[in-house]
Image (cartoon, rainbow, N blue to C red):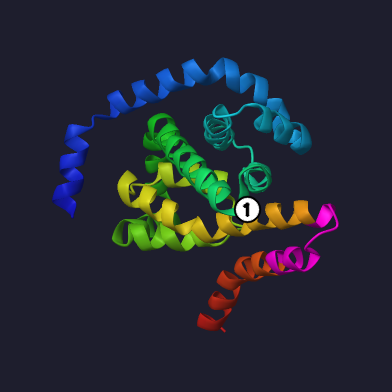
């Protein structure tokens, strides 16, 4: 496993990844600037996406990436994705956008603040223990953190970038760990829209209950482990 990670690291140099990400951001920036204000207006955003045809998916994913990178919660986008694309496709596009945004935020933090953070970690015993725990079981650690839908998603992206965790287990743990939360929020978006139209109120209540249960699950498990 470690050898394969090393090979990937050699064949995909960090400057090339950063250059590619920067180029994509520059190319997409004019269109994104038009849509970013709509993040705070769900109905207008939904209308614009419906009028964008094929490009709606591309715009939606790029908005997810951009919002995640600058720290705007992606919950609104995930809810809108459910209304615009349905449960299956809305979940898929939100999953792709949120994961790519989390990876981009991770690299941003690692490139800008990693050295400073590591010097601070060495001076704090508690932070050193935390950093060591991540290095021992990186995938499991990331997966556990990501599973809770109420965890501060954007903050966690940057915090992981300041640790020594490798980007591959971080990315994989993020991708798998956010699937339940993304699907739950998307389902709330779908059923919430239906409930507002006077349809399927019971499904909306079930979706909200499931989301609440998923949010409480990590706390219940922690209480069971440490009574």
Q: Residue at x 71, y 64 (%)?
A: 208
Give yes or no for residue 203 being in the magenta stretch.
yes
The part of the chain drawn in magenta is: 195-208
Q: Is residue 129 left or right of residue 203?
A: left
Determine the residue located farthest toward the right in the rendered image.
198
Residue 121, percent from left and from top: 41, 47
Q: Residue at x 57, y 84 (%)?
A: 227
Q: Quadrant of residue 16?
A: top left
Does residue 69 lie above or below 74 as drawn?
above
Q: Residue at x 65, y 71 (%)?
A: 213
Q: Is residue 137 left or right of residue 121?
A: left
| Residue indicated by mark 1 | 186
Residue 222, percent from left and from top: 54, 75
Q: Residue at x 69, y 64 (%)?
A: 207
Q: Is residue 28 left or right of residue 19?
A: right
Question: Please, what secondary structure does the residue beneath circle 1 have?
Answer: helix
Is residue 125 something that shows in the picture? no
Is residue 88 something that shows in the picture? yes
**Quadrant of the drawing holding the N terminus:** bottom left
Residue 181, percent from left and from top: 57, 58
Question: Neighbour class for label 1 at 10 Å: few (<14), some, many (≥20)?
Answer: many
Which of 105 and 124 lies nearest the eye of the viewer? 105
Give yes or no for residue 193 being in the magenta stretch.
no
Does residue 156 lie above or below 106 as drawn?
below
Residue 129, percent from left and from top: 38, 60
């Amino acid at each position: 496993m470690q050898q394969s990670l090393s090979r990937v690291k050699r064949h995909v140099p960090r400057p090339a990844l950063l250059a590619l990400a920067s180029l994509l951001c520059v190319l997409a920036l004019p269109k994104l600037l038009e849509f970013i204000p709509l993040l705070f207006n769900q109905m207008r955003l939904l209308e614009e996406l419906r009028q964008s045809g094929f490009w709606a998916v591309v715009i939606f994913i790029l908005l997810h990436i951009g919002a995640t990178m600058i720290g705007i919660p992606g919950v609104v986008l995930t809810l809108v994705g459910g209304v615009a694309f349905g449960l299956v496709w809305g979940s898929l596009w939100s999953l792709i956008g949120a994961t790519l945004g989390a990876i981009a935020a991770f690299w941003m933090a690692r490139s800008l603040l990693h050295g400073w953070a590591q010097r601070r970690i060495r001076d704090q015993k508690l932070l050193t223990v935390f950093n060591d725990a991540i290095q021992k079981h990186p995938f499991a650690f990331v997966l556990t953190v990501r599973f809770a839908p109420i965890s501060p998603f954007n903050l966690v992206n940057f915090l992981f970038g300041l640790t020594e965790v490798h980007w591959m287990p971080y990315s994989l743990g993020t991708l798998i760990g956010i699937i339940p939360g993304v699907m739950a929020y998307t389902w709330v978006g779908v059923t919430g829209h239906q409930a507002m139209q006077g349809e399927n109120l019971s499904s909306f209540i079930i979706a909200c209950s499931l989301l609440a249960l998923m949010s409480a699950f990590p706390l219940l498990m922690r209480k069971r482990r440490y009574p």
